[in-house]
Amino acid sequence: MVEKTAPAIELINVSRRFLSPTGKSLTAIRDFTMTVERGEFVAVVGPTGCGKSTTLNLVTGLASPSAGEVRVMGAPVKGIDPRIGFVFQTDALFPWRTVIENVMAGPLFRGKPKAEAQASARDWLARVGLARFEQHYPHQLSGGMRKRVALAQTFINGPEILLMDEPFSALDVQTRVLMHEELLRLWSEAKASVVFVTHDLEEAIALADKVYVLTAGPATVKSVYTIELPRPRVVADIRYDQSFIDYSRTIWADLKEEVETSYARAAA
Amino acid sequence: MTDATINISTATFKPGTSDAEIEAAAAKAAVNRRRTVLFWRLGILIVFLGSWELAGRMGWIDPFFYAMPSTIAGRLYEWMTEGTSEGPLWYHLFVTMEESVLGFVTGSVAGIIIGVALGRNRMAADIFSIYIKLINSIPRVVLAPIFIMILGLGLASKVALAFVMVFFVVFHNAFQGVREADRAMIANARILGASDWQLTRSVIVPSAMSWIFASLHVSFGFAIIGAIVGEFVGSRYGIGLLINIAKGSFDAAGMYAAIVIVMVVALGAEYLMTLAENRLAKWRPQPLHETQ
């Protein structure tokens, strides 16, 4: 029974190189090793442009590693895994579909009958508090509401692994805190394993069980911190907690060097 | 009471600034605007036609070459009531429309299908792009005699000409629209479980639709041009034939009358196209002010 005991995600000595438009080889991540246990919430922080998003693309199967191995639920990644859900940084909703049609997209793509998809979509829209907006188009909603639609669109497929690529970075601070609460609530119900990529350290500490700090590109794991703040957490208040502040100070000291390196490189 | 508390008195409106008053003023401004637009549109038309008529009657321009609005209107009336020398006007109009619509429909369907297919397949696009550029560089008018030689004087040669007029415009826009489709949206659909075909049908094509529609607007006009040029070069019926005959008999009024007919038809088609587009694009944000 390898399936049961294997971690949700394993990246073992993974490297990923790109070819630039001029034909030069660029290394995005190098010797990257990470393990995400089942039901664990892992946050990945690092300087901007260091290759954080690349790690997620390797797990989805949208990109494949140049070296090393990526395993999902104990098996090597081959193509897009249906057990994975992905929440994007940018708006990835389909603007020509209404809210409910957007949420129904996943089940319909996967061949579920329309009535079933619709019922399930209604249920998820109610859970994210958008039941009244079924027939609206995305452009009629605020940024926060669109993100909630995106969450419903992802969660409706019942993902066992949830990958999030700076999902809330475009939202204002108040909305972002609400979305954090929303996400933790959905996560605790869904029992999924989460990889949450962000450049916001406080967001990472408030949400995650483990925080991975990456080096300036090419990214590799610099250090891993286990966050032992009790759950359920109230994201709005946790930032005033003394142990939160301690975590924040320690990890920032670590991250700061990398941010400075990355900044110096960009300036050079 | 701490110092941080600020007393806010209830807002009082100056006269003329309540919501109802502002809305009423805006509605009135919108009506006025529409009236102004209509006034100037009609005004310009009347001044143009009036000075044309005047210049013709005063002998400033030779009505033999330039005709006059009144003789053109007379010729149109005569065509409508008594028919042309080649039979009823409506039949000629029907023939031209039939050719244009067939060319438009086949050309745009083919343009969309091939544009999307090549847009989705980089290898095929690289291989075929050179041929598409080559064929596209041929002046369409040159094709008219070739098509008439091959396909005869009837419907087929005009449809073929309208087809090539429409195809390239629609093809280019569909191709570009597919290439511009948002990458995050595509990735999202694939992770949600879309197969290649589902991705094309429910993400790529809808997102290319605004590009495609932009081309459909102009391309019905192109289809009419194709049909009329074809008729002009060789045909038994159609508006192009009427122009050709009018030319042969130095009937300036007849030529302009045929042009007027084409203008009215093209304007009507444009109107229908906008209606269809608005129905299909109801998901798009409406501008906050309405101009029409």
Image (cartoon, grey):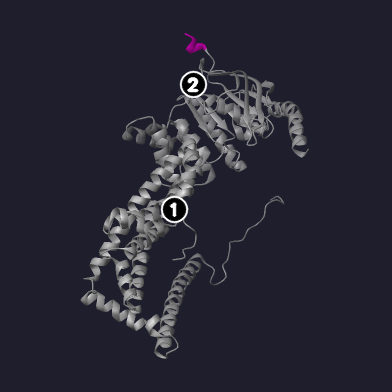
Mark 2 is on which residue type? Lys
Mark 2 falls within which chain?
A
Q: Nearer the viewer, residue B244 or A232?
A: B244
Q: Is residue B30 above or below residue B279?
A: below
The residue that label 2 is drawn on is A78
Q: CA distance from mark 2 to mark 1?
A: 40 Å
How dense is the environment of label 1, judged by Cα within 10 Å: few (below 14), some, or many (20 and up)? many
* Residue B81 is one of the magenta-drawn residues: no
How dense is the environment of label 2, judged by Cα within 10 Å: few (below 14), some, or many (20 and up)? some
Mark 1 is on which residue type? Val
Residue A162 visible: yes
Tell me the chief SS of the magenta region.
Answer: helix
Where is residue A250 drawn, in percent x and y? 74, 26
Q: Secondary structure at mark 1?
A: helix
Q: Is residue A105 above or below residue B37?
A: above
Q: Nearer the viewer, residue B28 or B250?
A: B250
In the image, which residues are magenta?
Answer: A1-5
Q: Residue furthest front?
A: B149
The residue that label 1 is drawn on is B169
Q: Secondary structure at mark 2?
A: loop
Residue B177 visible: no
